[in-house]
Image (spheres, rainbow, N blue to C red):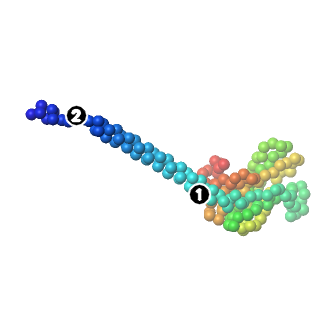
């Protein structure tokens, strides 16, 4: 009886082999479609993330420090000159807790942050389309070049810092201050 069952088994035909090939091709096509769909989804997600970051930085790009202006001491003391940097908020939103850090370069060297400025310079609130002023009492040296970095909270509650005309950089609150860019 076993011999009869084995003998009755049909031999695969050309049509059977074509069916196997088409099934394998369909499987490869399905896998390729899944991989392409995942690639498109990842690319689209990255593009949306970039657009979101760009939208978040829109107000921050409109907040910047202007050129150095000499500032007179209120007491008239000329031995300790003051320098002021106007800070412009050209955005439609209010900027809060704006602080500044002074950078100094003597005789063409690299700009370095001034560590000895005794009190932090701060503007609590800078209204839309207005200008405030950060005043510093730097060291008096000949041939000195100054720059200022401003740090602020935008209308959306995001913290940023910006130095000169560079793009604003988001300050992450869970990142240690000495690791901030």
Count every numbered label the image shows and give the total.
2
**Residue shown at 76% from the left, 62% from the top:** 88
**Residue shown at 89% from the left, 55% from the top:** 79
Q: Provide the secondary structure element on which disc 2 rests.
A: loop
**Residue shown at 34% from the left, 42% from the top:** 23
x and y, in percent, of residue 152 in the image: 68, 60
Depth check: give the residue in front, 86 or 63.
Answer: 63
**Which mark lies nearer to you, 1 or 2?**
2
Depth check: give the residue in front, 11 or 156.
Answer: 11
Quarter containing the N terminus = top left
x and y, in percent, of residue 2 in the image: 11, 33
Identity of the residue furthest to the bottom in this view: 127
Q: Report if residue 125 is visible in the image.
A: no
**Residue shown at 81% from the left, 51% from the top:** 146
Distance CA(mark 1)–CA(mark 2): 62 Å
Packing grade of label 2 (10 A; few <14, some 14-19, many >=20) is few
Identity of the residue furthest to the top in this view: 3
The numbered disc on residue 40 is: none
Q: Residue 75: name its quadrant.
A: bottom right
Q: Residue 17: name its quadrant.
A: top left
Q: Provide the secondary structure element on which disc 1 rests.
A: helix
Identity of the residue furthest to the left in this view: 1
x and y, in percent, of residue 42 in the image: 51, 49
Packing grade of label 1 (10 A; few <14, some 14-19, many >=20) is few
Q: Earlier in the sequence, mark 1 or mark 2?
A: 2
Residue annotated with mark 1: 52
Q: Residue 160: name its quadrant.
A: bottom right
Identity of the residue furthest to the front in this view: 14
Residue annotated with mark 2: 11
């Amino acid at each position: 009886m076993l011999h009869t069952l084995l003998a009755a088994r049909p031999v695969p035909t050309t049509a059977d082999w074509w069916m196997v090939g088409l099934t394998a091709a369909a499987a490869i096509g399905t896998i390729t479609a899944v991989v392409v769909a995942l690639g498109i989804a990842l690319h689209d997600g990255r593009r949306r993330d970039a657009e979101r970051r760009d939208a978040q930085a829109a107000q921050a790009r409109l907040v910047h420090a202007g050129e150095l202006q000499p500032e007179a001491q209120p007491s008239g003391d000329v031995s300790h000159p003051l320098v002021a940097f106007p800070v412009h908020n050209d955005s439609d939103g209010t900027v809060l807790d704006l602080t500044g850090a002074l950078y100094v370069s003597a005789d063409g060297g690299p700009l370095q942050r001034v560590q000895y400025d005794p009190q932090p310079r701060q503007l609590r609130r800078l209204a839309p389309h207005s200008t405030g002023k950060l005043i510093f009492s730097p060291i008096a040296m000949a041939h000195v070049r100054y720059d200022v970095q401003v740090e602020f909270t935008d209308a959306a509650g995001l913290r940023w810092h910006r130095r000169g005309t560079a793009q604003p950089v988001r300050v992450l609150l869970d990142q240690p201050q000495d690791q901030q860019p």
